Structures are given as C-alpha cells and as structure tokens.
Image (tube, rainbow, N blue to C red):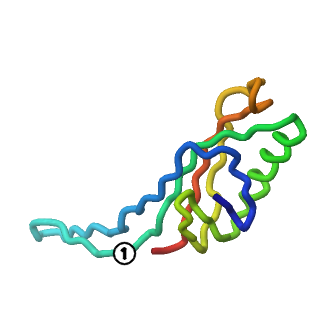
Amino acid sequence: MTFNGYAMFGRVFECITSENPRDEQKIAIGGVNGVGSLDMGDRGRVTSVKGLLYGDLAGLIASDLFFRQAKDGRYYTLVDTLGRTWVHVKLHRYVPQGRVINDIWYGLVQHYDCEFIHSGG
C-alpha cells in the first residue's frame, strides 16, 4: 500500500474504500403537499485505514511526521492493499491510537487510524 509512491503505512490491518452518499437538496413548497428532491451528484469515496507503525524511536517519529506532513490538502495517488490505484486522493485525518508500546518483535509500535477523501467518482 502506498500514498504518493511512499510505503508509509507500516503494517495495515484494515483498508476499506466506500462510497459517500449522493448529495441531494430537499425542496418544500408552501401550499403543496410533499417534498421534492434535487440530485446534487456524487460526492466521491472515502478510504479508511487501520494500521501499526513500528521500528526504533527515530523510525517511529519519522513515520508519524510523514503522515502529518502528508496532510497538506493536496491530491495524490493511493494504491490500496488489493493493488487498486486511486487518483486524486488526499489525506483527511491521521489519528495515533493509544500509547507507544515496546514490543519484543517489532520494537516500538503505535497503532493509528487514517482516512482519505477521494475527489470524485
């Protein structure tokens, strides 16, 4: 899995891409029964990732910083765990979870959640 060509995700446990609901505008006209609806179009997709960053202290800090710098509002290419390529995707949210743990196999580990917004259908 990569974002802008970088394998920054560590160990990925879950990667789900789902559709955002279509946007619509409800219209009510005084004196007329019922409600009308205008279709406002597609609102793209969302990819949610749950993973684990690991390594020595310098590597863990670098991985965390890379996520924070990738949240720059720009659109990049995301390749998911199935190898699908999604273009025009930006990092919307990165949230470290819990505390950093010292694991005998992986070194320092930090769970995280992140969410990517796709610009269109």
Compared with 62, 41 (above or below) is below
Residue 102 location, quadrant? top right
Residue 19 location, quadrant? bottom left
Tally the numbered discs.
Answer: 1
Q: Is residue 93 left or right of residue 100?
A: left
Q: Is residue 39 left or right of residue 93?
A: left
Mark 1: amino acid: Met
Residue at the image point whose x is 79% and y is 56% from the top: 69
Q: Is residue 2 left or right of residue 66?
A: left
Residue 116 location, quadrant? bottom right
Label 1 packing within 10 angstroms: few (<14), some (14-19), many (20+)? few
Q: Position of residue 94 (x, y in %)?
A: 66, 47
Most foreground residue, 82 or 44: 82
Q: Quadrant of the N terminus?
A: bottom right
- The residue carrying mark 1 is 40
Residue situated furthest front in the rendering: 105
Residue at the image point whose x is 18% and y is 66% from the top: 35
Q: Position of residue 87 (x, y in %)?
A: 59, 74
Compared with 40, 35 (above or below) is above
Most foreground residue, 93 or 35: 93
Q: Secondary structure at mark 1?
A: strand
Q: Quadrant of the C terminus?
A: bottom left
Q: Position of residue 92 (x, y in %)?
A: 62, 56
